[in-house]
Image (cartoon, rainbow, N blue to C red):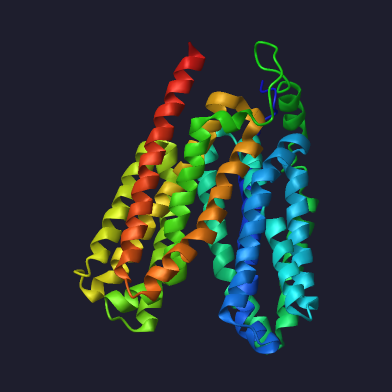
Amino acid sequence: MSTLAEPIDARHDVEVISLVGIAHGTSHFFHLLLPSLFPWLMKDFDLSFTQVGFLTTVFFLVSGIGQALAGFVVDRVGARRVLMFGIGMLSVAGVLVGLATSYAGLVLGAAAAGFGNSIFHPADFTLLNRRVTAPRLGHAFSAHGLAGYLGWAAAPAFVTGLAGVWNWHVAAFGAAAVGAVVFALLQARWRIIDDQAAHAIIAAGSATTEGGRAESQFAFLGSAAVWLCFLFFFLTTSGFGILQTYAPAVLGSVYKMPLALATAALTAYLLGSAAGIVTGGFVAARFPDSDKVIALMLGLAALVALVLATATVPRWAVLACMATMGFGVGVAGPNRDLLVRKAATSQFGKRSYGRVYGFVYSGTDVGLAMAPILLGPVLDAGHFAVALYAVAAFQLGALIGALRVGVRTRTAAVAAAE
């Protein structure tokens, strides 16, 4: 009998996955709260693109720093409590934005939203690892990633719809209400996602190593595999950040496409990614070597990016190429999350899920914050194809990192077995 009381009922697993997925989708919903309101905020507060862009930078900077620290809190007090705090903070952020009467108020709202967003990856993945049975983890990570995409898709329609019918204040309060409803749902079903029993057992056994020596809370920072995972997340997200920010402009320039068609190409990438995430869950359940799956899929994505950069693809095929690239990145997603799990457990067991996931996922925020800034001057100079070469380079770098993590993880697992 499992000492961690892990659920064996498939319906229980499904409910855990669904509740954590809803929470993750809510965090992504709040990613786009302020960007969806930019047209109204720029008009009412007479803001420049630089000023509204700074709001996004504040969000991701606070989220990135907070995410690296939140994992320690998750490992100390448990994931469910931290998750509830994050959802509550997002709702508070919506209220702060709705009440804002100055640019400083918007900055405060962005910081609060980033603070709330910072806890989701360490809390979500700790809950999934503790409350979902191992054979279903691949599907759990797949559903988790897909829920994030659904949150991104829902936010612009919901927020701009309310702002168009009423005003941006009502839209922000509406977003706060979404957070409050999700908070109430998670509170009503708290027993399903409660990890206190597992947390207490793991915490009791984590104070010392097998030899009886005290173990530092920062021991994971001495692991090369953990740093490689951080680099992997930074590289993959940097490539995505370039496409998310500049794809319409880049494709419009390289292929002389109208804005509507170039924007549709970005949509094709996102739809391909969503389909890849769903497929990736089945692939992860079938093929245990996550690093090799990631390498194959990112290799495909990098190849497509390189071909697009040459400007030799017929314009009618650009959308298909973008969808293919997104599919490759999407399939890598659930396998990436399993790879991090293996890297964590191969050296630190289950006691450091929060710290490891929090630290490596902070690489995503760094990538989203840095890549557009680094590529902006290049595009200002008119070198639009360079952006696609950069996407390919980031994906190739991530590919190499994933393979290195896989080798180190298997080596550590063999050493532990011996």
Across and down, in percent, residue 36 comes to 60, 76
Check the picture and name the quadrant holding the N terminus: top right
Number of callouts: 0
The structure residue drawn at horizontal position 28% and vertical position 74%, both measured from the top left corner, is 254
Across and down, in percent, residue 257 comes to 30, 81
Residues 33 and 221: in front is 221
Does residue 270 show up?
no
The answer to whether residue 299 is above or below residue 404 is below
Residues 179 and 221: in front is 221
The structure residue drawn at horizontal position 66% and vertical position 29%, both measured from the top left corner, is 351
Across and down, in percent, residue 266 comes to 40, 70
The structure residue drawn at horizontal position 44% and vertical position 69%, both measured from the top left corner, is 376
Does residue 101 show up?
yes
The answer to whether residue 138 is above or below residue 25 is above
Relative to residue 286, is residue 23 drawn left or right? right
The answer to whether residue 260 is above or below residue 397 is below
Relative to residue 266, is residue 345 drawn left or right? right
Residues 194 and 365: in front is 365
